[in-house]
Image: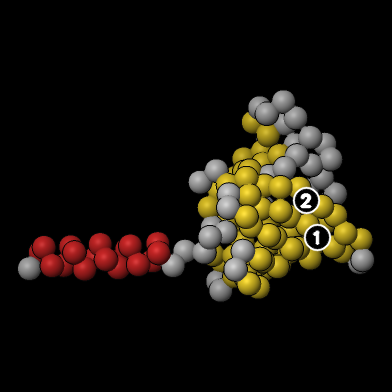
């Protein structure tokens, strides 16, 4: 009986992983206006996806302290069509939140956003996990 119970638990655990959104995981951002970049952990937050800054790096690639660690950089994000997402993205270097467009191609994510008609290219992020 124990074998069957363990097998059922394993199948349920694998089923959850099989339905994970392709955007979920760890992403390395492009450098911002100051040359800084970060690691963003994307995960579900309710019915949408959010991305939290977990590490920050300076222009030289060394890890740096940042007041934005733990801050949601991506929020209110939903899949519009396969590999295309929309939501909000926060830009720490400009202290602005943009309506975002995220386009995923393989392990890269092209990030862009607009606020009050002013649009900005957030560069290409790379999936690291």
Q: Earlier in the sequence, mark 2 or mark 1?
A: 1
Quarter of the view holding residue 119: bottom right
Which SS class for mark 2?
Answer: strand
Quarter of the view holding residue 96: bottom right
Residue sitting at 56 percent across and 66 percent down? 45
Percent of width and height locating residue 73: 69, 54
Left-right relation of 63 to 19: right
Quarter of the view holding residue 87: bottom right
**Disc 2 target residue:** 122
Left-right relation of 2 to 58: left
Decide: few, some or many residues near mark 1? Use Cα within 10 Å; few <14, some 14-19, many ≥20: many
**Disc 1 target residue:** 113
The answer to whether one can see residue 112 in this image is yes
Percent of width and height locating residue 13: 32, 63
Which residue is at the front of the view, 84 or 27?
84
Taking 66 as reference, is 98 above or below it? Answer: below
Task: Confirm or deny contact between disc 2 and disc 1 (CB under 8 A).
Answer: yes
Q: Quadrant of the N terminus?
A: bottom left
The answer to whether one can see residue 53 in this image is no
């Amino acid at each position: 009986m124990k074998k069957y119970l363990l097998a059922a638990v394993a199948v349920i655990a694998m089923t959850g992983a099989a339905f994970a959104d392709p955007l979920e995981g760890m992403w390395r951002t492009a450098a911002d206006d100051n040359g800084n970049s970060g690691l963003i952990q994307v995960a579900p937050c309710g019915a949408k996806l959010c991305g939290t800054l977990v590490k920050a790096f300076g222009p030289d690639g060394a890890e740096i302290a940042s007041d934005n660690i733990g801050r949601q950089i991506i929020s209110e994000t939903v899949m519009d069509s396969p590999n295309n997402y929309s939501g909000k993205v926060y830009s720490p270097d400009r202290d602005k939140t943009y309506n975002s467009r995220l386009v995923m191609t393989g392990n890269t994510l092209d990030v862009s956003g607009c606020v009050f008609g002013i649009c900005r290219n957030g560069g290409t992020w790379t999936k690291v996990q």
